[in-house]
Image (tube, rainbow, N blue to C red):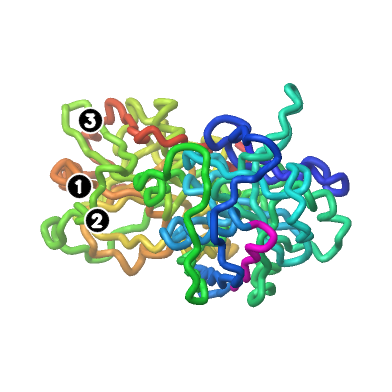
């Protein structure tokens, strides 16, 4: 896929590129003559957009149609449609900008349309708004270094907000990107998000800010629909951003998952005391994974990347690599959970890497899944009783499926839930009912024949992993 970028700043080099994927697969529409296609009767009032973040912070923006009329109309239309609700600031460059607006959550989504770039390099002289601190602007594809194509008309839905306090960091943006508004309240929250640590190569933040909702007050004015090149946004793409961005984990020296990774049962209720997690939501458009056992039984999981993005990406990557094929359920606690995912079959295997724990005890503010029956979570090391080390970032390949909701209190917010059983809960309970030895190992361990995944044609990025000493 092509990638969108704000041109590289000389001061910040290539690390400050702002990426998106190519919308409509090219350089946008070829416009006739010098005249720009601007919607008719664009009001002169300044709409006010309120971005409410999931953490409760609020950022307010004032939009300036006198500088970029079609860009403002496009943004207003997207906000009204609810497009930005639930999306992430998937890219952060400290002291420079924060970027959001991709329904895929990766910066590489394609909404199927583009708009014309309203800035001077593209022949539009009315936009003199500079990229000062707090200014909002549209991200687009950067210049194609092979063909020389400028890609000026390739913006669509992704935007960035400037955090830079120094004009030396933003002068190269002026006249090259369509600035169209400015933060009027909440610039301190922009600074807070822009200060978050992010991966040095991808600029994906470790702790990704999430937009709860965006609303717009047009001051009673009627803003026309924007002029776009390409197909309209599809409801499936707008409202089903299932490919979420990775959350780059911080380094840790935690060991690989051992047999103590999953919590132990504490007076769990009987296997029939709670219903299976067969969600009432429509899961037909979700990514799914099918666990086929050697005896023919099948367990189908619905994946929730919007709750635990890197965890889902890690799981999908392992499934595609056939890591789980032939692996046994090595640990079973009747009425509580069944655990698998260790190639050695002991629960003590070391794959040489771990992933960041996406749960509230580890600082994650997005994953609010609870451990009802049939929920799938990542096994990890427990707390080190000697050192007090929490080992929150020690999960890797092992996962467990809950058989009941009896241990919600000890699991919720402590282990990264990322999927739910939607078919085959009876198989889970058959496994949970097996006779085990004193170490919770089944006397006849059930074996996974294969796991397959249906990504519903969404592109799932590679997981971010922490290398550990083996």
Is residue 32 shown above or below 133? above
For marks 1 and 3 on the same chain, the one whose residue lies earlier in the sequence: 3
Residue 279 visible somewhere in the drawing: yes
Is residue 307 shown above or below 222? above
163 left or right, relative to 241:
right
Is residue 8 shown above or below 377? above
Please name the residue shown 24% across and 39% down the image.
300
Residue 395: horizontal and vertical position, in percent? Answer: 48, 47
Binning the other alpha carbons within 10 Å of mark 3 as few (below 14), some (14 to 19) or many (20 upward) gives: many
Q: Say what secondary structure mark 3 lies in.
A: strand
Quadrant in which the C terminus appears: top right
For marks 3 and 2 on the same chain, the one whose residue lies earlier in the sequence: 3
Q: Which mark is residue 293?
A: 3
Binning the other alpha carbons within 10 Å of mark 2 as few (below 14), some (14 to 19) or many (20 upward) gives: many
Question: Residue 399 appears in which quarter of the rendering?
Answer: top left
- Residue at the far top: name it: 146
Q: Is residue 453 magenta?
A: no
Q: Are marks 1 and 3 in contact (CB under 8 Å)?
A: no
Quadrant in which the N terminus appears: top right
Query: Which contiguous range is marked in magenta?
Result: 60-68
Q: Are marks 2 and 1 in contact (CB under 8 Å)?
A: yes
Mark 1 lies on residue: 432
Q: CA distance from mark 3 to mark 2?
A: 20 Å
Residue 361: horizontal and vertical position, in percent? Answer: 49, 66
Q: CA distance from mark 1 to mark 3?
A: 14 Å
Mark 2 lies on residue: 336
């Amino acid at each position: 896929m092509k990638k969108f970028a704000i041109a590289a700043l000389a001061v910040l080099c290539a690390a400050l590129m702002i990426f998106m994927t190519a919308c409509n697969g090219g350089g946008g529409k070829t416009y006739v003559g010098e005249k720009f296609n601007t919607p008719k009767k664009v009001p002169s009032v300044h709409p006010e957009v309120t971005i409410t973040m999931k953490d409760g912070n609020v950022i307010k923006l004032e939009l300036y149609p006198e500088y970029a009329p079609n860009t403002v109309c496009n943004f207003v239309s997207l906000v009204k449609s609810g497009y930005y609700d639930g999306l992430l600031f998937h890219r952060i460059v400290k002291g420079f900008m924060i970027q959001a607006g991709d329904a895929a959550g990766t910066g590489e989504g394609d909404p199927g349309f583009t708009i014309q770039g309203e800035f001077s390099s593209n022949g539009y002289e009315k936009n003199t708004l500079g990229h000062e601190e707090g200014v909002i602007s549209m991200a687009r594809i950067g210049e194609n270094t092979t063909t020389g194509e400028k890609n000026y008309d390739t913006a669509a839905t992704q935007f960035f907000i400037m955090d830079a306090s120094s004009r030396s960091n933003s002068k190269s943006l002026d006249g090259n990107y369509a600035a169209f508004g400015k933060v009027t309240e909440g610039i301190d929250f922009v600074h807070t998000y822009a200060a978050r640590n992010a991966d040095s190569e991808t600029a994906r933040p470790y702790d990704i800010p999430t937009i709860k909702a965006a609303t717009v007050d047009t001051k009673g004015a009627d803003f026309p629909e924007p002029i776009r090149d390409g197909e309209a946004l599809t409801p499936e793409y707008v409202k089903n951003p299932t490919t979420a961005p990775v959350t780059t984990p911080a380094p840790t020296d935690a060991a690989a998952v051992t047999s103590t990774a999953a919590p132990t049962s504490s007076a769990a209720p009987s296997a029939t005391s709670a219903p299976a997690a067969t969600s009432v939501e429509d899961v037909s458009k979700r990514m799914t994974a099918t666990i086929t056992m050697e005896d023919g039984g099948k367990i189908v999981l619905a994946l929730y990347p919007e709750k635990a993005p890197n965890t889902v990406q890690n799981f999908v990557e392992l499934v595609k690599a056939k890591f789980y094929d032939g692996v046994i359920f090595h640990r079973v606690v009747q009425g509580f959970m069944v655990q698998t995912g260790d190639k050695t079959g002991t629960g003590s295997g070391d794959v040489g890497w771990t992933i960041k724990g996406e749960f509230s005890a580890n600082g994650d503010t997005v994953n609010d899944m609870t451990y009802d029956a049939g929920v799938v979570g990542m096994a990890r090391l427990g707390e080190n009783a000697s050192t007090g080390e929490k080992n929150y970032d020690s999960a890797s390949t092992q996962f467990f499926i809950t058989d009941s909701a009896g241990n919600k209190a000890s699991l919720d917010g402590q282990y990264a839930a990322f999927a739910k059983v939607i078919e085959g809960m009876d198989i889970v309970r058959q496994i949970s009912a097996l006779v085990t030895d004193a170490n919770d190992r089944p006397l006849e361990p059930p074996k996974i024949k294969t796991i397959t995944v249906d990504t519903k044609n969404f592109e799932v990025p590679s997981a971010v992993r922490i290398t550990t000493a083996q």
